[in-house]
Image: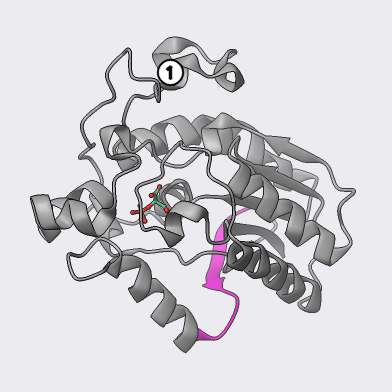
Amino acid sequence: MKKIVLLRHGESAWNKENRFTGWTDVDLTEKGIEEAYKAGELLRKEGYVFDKAYTSYLKRAVKTLNCVLDRMDQDWIPVEKSWRLNEKHYGALQGLNKSETAEKYGDEQVLIWRRSYDVAPHALKEDDPRNPRFEIRYKDVPDAELPRTESLKDTVERILPYWKDVIFPSLETADQILVTAHGNSLRGIIKYVRNIPDEEIVHLNLPTAVPYVLEFDDDLNLVKDYFLGDPEEIKKLMEAVANQGKKTKK
Ligand SMILES: O=C(O)[C@@H](CO)OP(=O)(O)O
């Protein structure tokens, strides 16, 4: 059985402050580092031996991967980073507190911005210092491909070439692959792989640092997918993520 493990990064500074993050390069908190080590411990106990890992250009994902591999004593495996695995770009919402945004625009609107498939938040202006075109790390990405905001649909469209051409074909020679990325970039991958309808993807909330396993048969058909860990605890964590966009959450 071939496996791809998807892992959202551990808690970041802006997860803790409940701010829209997107492409902002915030670090892990102490708790986030602990969560990442815990995920590594779980994967080690379950006997995972990864052939290769993929991650984004954002340090919360990169550092989570490093903690996981450290705990598994698999620091040596090849790692490839791609901007295409970055979080959904949250446009002008980046930096704003999610509950305060819900106070201002309502829970419904925030849910649409956070979880709908094809609605994007307002775009960053061309001269906004947060515009990715000013960042050296994206210097090799054609400007037309650099987002100023994204819907999940846009995110899926920029991830898919990388998934189809690089990550998925690597299963032909590898048995176990780890992808460490972000809540929405991974929702996009799961939506594609499981063929989840647009209106149902609203309900999927990925908790931080809980491994999600995709199992494939020898013909690379998906046969099983599941979270690793205690289902009751994971359910609570998923609900907590959903509630981050509500007025009552401070
Ligand atoms: O702010 C973000 O970039 C994401 C992930 O933390 O948040 P949300 O869960 O609101 O999509």
| Left or right: 180 as drawn, with respect to 174 | left
Decide whether residue 246 is among the magenta residues.
no
Residue at 27% over, 33% down: 92
| Left or right: 61 as drawn, with respect to 204 | right
The spot of residue 202 in percent (x, y) is: 26, 58
- Asked if the beta carbon under badge 1 is closer than 8 A to the nearest atom of ligand 1, the reply is no
The spot of residue 171 in percent (x, y) is: 71, 47
Residue at mark 1: 145
Residue at 64% over, 43% down: 55
Disc 1 crowd rating (10 Å Cα; few below 14, some 14-19, many 20+) is few
| Left or right: 53 as drawn, with respect to 25 | right
Q: Total marks drawn?
A: 1
Whether residue 213 appears in this view of the structure is: no
Residue at 79% over, 78% down: 45
Foreground residue among 194 and 155: 155
SS type, badge 1: helix
- Type of the residue with mark 1: Glu
Q: Is residue 199 above or below residue 232?
A: above
The spot of residue 141 in percent (x, y) is: 54, 16
Foreground residue among 69 and 93: 93
The magenta segment: 219-231
Decide whether residue 228 is among the magenta residues.
yes
The spot of residue 183 in percent (x, y) is: 45, 54
Placement of the N terminus among the 4 image quadrants: bottom right
